[in-house]
Image (spheres, grey):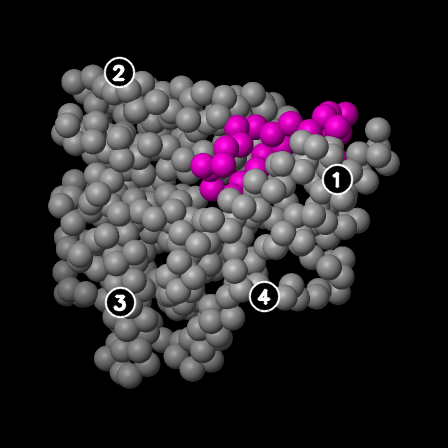
Amino acid sequence: MNHQPHKDNSSLPKKVVYFDNTATSFPKPDSVVEALTNYVTNIGANPGRSGHSLAIKAGEIVFNARRELATMFGVKNPMKVVFGFNATDALNTAIKGFLRKGDHVITTAMEHNSTIRPLKQLEEDGLITLSIAEADKYGKVKPEDIEKLITDKTTLIVVNHVSNVNGAVQEIESIGRICHSHNLTLLVDGAQSAGYLPVNLKEANIDIYAFTGHKGLYGTQGTGGLIFNDEFDYKKIKPFRAGGTGSRSADIVQPDFLPDMFESGTLNTGGIAGLLEGIRFVKNEGVENILKHEQQLASRFVEKAIKEISGFKHFGYSSENVGIVSFQIDGLSVSEIAGELSEKYGIMCRHGLHCAPLAHRSLGSFPEGTVRFGFGVFNSMEEVEFAIEVLVKIQKENI
């Protein structure tokens, strides 16, 4: 892969190794930075709100981003791409808008809190019933275990495509076939699969796909949304946000057409401009090439860590996972490891439960959690080697 040099920052160690791409990708491609700067400097207008030339340019940016996303995920109609703030916002829109009182929902033990919390909220309010399919120690959920939980009240199945804890990939195509054979709707949390894996909504029988822009699509925070399968009836979802859309302004009721139905208020147009270039960057690099690169980094890290770090333990790592490794080292707390990596050596990562406590219970890393390395397109084998050397040093100094 073509790597960008890490930029110095006087408040950080001189050399920064960024292994927190699972939380948000960094650095961003130059084209993303340039698009953000160009929007703020030369355009700045609201899309769809005015007829002047700058508003038209802003609208073109938003439409082009819809079109690129639709193409990337196998959707013919760009209007089936609805922008929000992030994957959490998108999941809340889909979950709370789709479900009705008395519905039964099935989800999995590998979900992020962005899914579990809105579902539990609805369950505790007495609006739905909820079943959770268990995962094995590798973070995999058997599709047949999901099917066994289906009842005559089931309307929705919600699945985390890729675990943010260890990168485990669920058998989404098989789950999609099960959903469609039972006439159920499949909502997929694609926060960790968008840009990391090839995804085609039609081929995978995914009805609704929630994505975020600031991870594998190399955009910035504050971008994301929902993508609907061309055949999915989006009117099954009641928008919980209403307001100005720039369309049908004489009406005092919310528009019932896409994308306006779900896009009240001013969009993060600058962020979408950056996201558009992030998508193009991923397209040019090739999703498969990015995945292979990140998997190679993860594989090398685990291979060397097992050999050179006494008491190293990974949680559910597999060569088939995306480039994420969660680990512990005997005798050291995860906070101690992450703190020293950052403060002394400039290696940025995340520690703890990663907003996914059920996943950690499944993997056996609850309640302490793990140190998580999330590799990205701009990471290198040299950085992996450096991290191994540093971890060996930290272990020797503290045990």
Which of the marked residues, 3 or 1, is nearer the chain's N terminus? 3
- Looking at the image, which residue is at 63% across and 32% down? 327
Q: Identify the residue under disc 3.
A: 63
Tell me the kind of residue under disc 2: Lys
Q: Identify the residue under disc 4.
A: 4
Q: Distance between the residues labelled 3 and 4?
A: 29 Å
Seen in the picture, residue 34 relative to 298 is either above or below; the reply is: below
Badge nearest the viewer, 3 or 4: 4
Q: Where is residue 121 in the image (x, y as percent from the top left)?
A: 38, 28
Per the image, label 4 sits on a secondary structure element best described as loop
Tell me the number on the disc at residue 148.
2
Magenta region includes residue 145: no
Badge nearest the viewer, 2 or 3: 2
- Label 1 Cα neighbours within 10 Å, binned few <14 / some 14-19 / many ≥20: many
Per the image, label 3 sits on a secondary structure element best described as helix
Q: Distance between the residues labelled 2 and 4?
A: 48 Å
The answer to whether any part of residue 98 appears in the image is no
Q: Identify the residue under disc 1.
A: 391
Tell me the kind of residue under disc 4: Gln
- Looking at the image, which residue is at 52% across and 60% down? 1
Q: Where is residue 196 in the image (x, y as percent from the top left)?
A: 42, 48
Q: Which of 371 and 37 is in front in this view?
A: 371
Q: Give the range drawn in magenta.
A: 310-336
Badge nearest the viewer, 1 or 2: 1
